Amino acid sequence: MEIELRWLRYVVAVADHGGMQRAADALHMTQPPLSRQIRELERRLGTSLFTRRPVSLTAAGAVLVEHAREVLSSVDNLVTATRSTATGEAGELAVGYILSGAYDTIPRLREASTAAYPGLRLDSRELWPAQLDAGLLDGELDLVIAHTMPVRPEFRRERLRTDPLVAVTRPKNPAASGAGPVRLGEAFDGQTFVFYDPKYAPEHYAVLTKALDAGGGSHAVRLDMTPGLRNIVLPDDYSFTLIPESMKPFLPRTVREVPLDTSALPALEVELVWHRERESPGLLRFLAIAREVSAGRDWLTASYT
């Protein structure tokens, strides 16, 4: 049996307004056509939905109205969700990011996106650079937020924030005794630079070695086989590593951040990277939000000393 949605709306209107004429007025139609539609629905159902003079719901009519409200509400939600998804105000966006993004960048973007578009859900994933690259190529990811992503003709990219480097060491390291920015080559000359195996993030490691070369001085290199900045262990008071400045508010108490004179050092340029053939409305909405956050927080103005 086919039941038209408009019949359900008519029955609910009569129940809500307590009469055919008042329901017809609310529906912006005349009373006779409304009465005919109600009778047609009753004929198909094989039962009366209303008693006449005065108009009131029968037991069967009350059951139908209860369920009709649920159906109509679901249909309204369906229409709203479909339109919102088509305009990018709702849906799901798969966003991949590097480890450093988990501390400041991603939380701030998520907060702004949720405030602007509560229906747009972010499926955010922390991944290694090679995984981010593959995910963007095969469509597993809609957007990547990272530095040192490969340059490919399939990708579009836009700078999001400049993240200068800071040194991290143990509190008793002589380089940590001062208050102001230090020169990397002078403060850490002869000390051991610690990082994880470069195979996990070779482009990132290349930026750091470039910084060591630009800073001058002599540094032994120790590679920690446990991957990830969270797992780096500084073996003694004369060892250090380099991290993005955005991570420094989240350092454990067991280490100390040492501000660097970054005038001669490279910075990590965090970018928004996406596939040029998969620019969904939701992605475009999120990109606009990311630009607003970046501008509002001066992310593209590096805090160089």
Image (cartoon, rainbow, N blue to C red):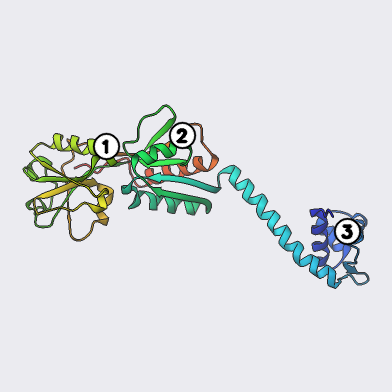
| Residue type, label 2 | His
Q: Relative to the observer, which residue lies in front, 96 or 51?
A: 96
Q: Which mark is residue 202?
A: 1
Label 1: how many Cα within 10 Å (few below 14, some 14–19, many 20+): some
Looking at the image, the residue that sits furthest to the top is 153
| Rendered residue at 41%/49% (across/down) | 125
Q: Quadrant of the N terminus?
A: bottom right
The Cα atoms of the two marked residues, 3 and 2, are separated by: 52 Å
Residue 16 in view of the camera: no
Q: Quadrant of residue 50?
A: bottom right
CB contact under 8 Å: marks 3 and 2: no
SS of the residue at dot 1? helix
Label 3: how many Cα within 10 Å (few below 14, some 14–19, many 20+): some
The Cα atoms of the two marked residues, 1 and 2, are separated by: 22 Å
| Residue type, label 1 | Pro
Q: Which residue is mark 2?
A: 275
Q: Which residue is mark 3?
A: 41
Label 2: how many Cα within 10 Å (few below 14, some 14–19, many 20+): many
Nearer the N terminus, badge 3 or badge 2? 3
| Residue type, label 3 | Leu
Q: Quadrant of the C terminus?
A: top left
Q: Position of residue 280 (x, y in %)?
A: 53, 39
CB contact under 8 Å: marks 1 and 3: no
| Rendered residue at 23%/39% (across/down) | 205
Residue 16 vertical placement versus 106 (above, below): below
